[in-house]
């Protein structure tokens, strides 16, 4: 999932997030937590810190999603 700064500027963080979540088919249980974390990152001023934080969070959610599919 890629959050384009231009897209966020034009549509806003919430609408951009909703569209990307729908495309990525993120489970409902993880959507709120991810949104809160993205908002936290959105207010970081250092671009490298924002990107690093988002990559870690998205990797964790992806791993969790992969694990949950293995158990079904």
Image (cartoon, helix red, strand yellow):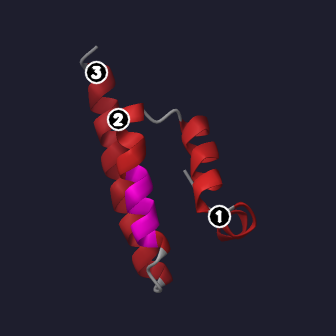
Residue furthest to the left in view is: 71
Part of the protein shown in magenta: 34-41
x and y percent of residue 1 in the render? 54, 50
Mark 1 secondary-structure assignment: loop
- Residue holding disc 3: 70
Q: Specify few, some or many for label 2: CA neighbours under 10 Å numbering under 14, 14-19, or 20 or more.
A: few
On screen, residue 14 versus residue 67, left or right, reads right
Q: Specify few, some or many for label 3: CA neighbours under 10 Å numbering under 14, 14-19, or 20 or more.
A: few
Point out which mark residue 56 bears: none
- Residue at 46% from the left image edge and 86% from the top image edge: 46
Cβ atoms at labels 1 and 3 below 8 Å apart: no
Mark 2 secondary-structure assignment: helix
Point out which mark residue 4 bears: 1
User: For the C terminus, which image quadrant?
Assistant: top left
Mark 3 secondary-structure assignment: helix
- Front residue (pair 41, 52): 41
Query: Closer to the camera: disc 1 or disc 3?
Result: 1
- Residue at 34% from the left image edge and 32% from the top image edge: 66
- Residue holding disc 2: 29
- Nearer the N terminus, badge 3 or badge 2? 2
């Amino acid at each position: 999932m890629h959050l384009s700064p231009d897209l966020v500027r034009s549509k806003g963080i919430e609408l951009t997030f909703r569209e990307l979540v729908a495309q990525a088919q993120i489970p409902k249980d993880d959507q709120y937590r991810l949104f809160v974390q993205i908002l936290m990152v959105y207010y970081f001023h250092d671009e490298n810190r924002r990107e690093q934080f988002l990559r870690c969070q998205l990797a964790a959610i992806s791993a969790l999603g992969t694990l949950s599919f293995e158990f079904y």
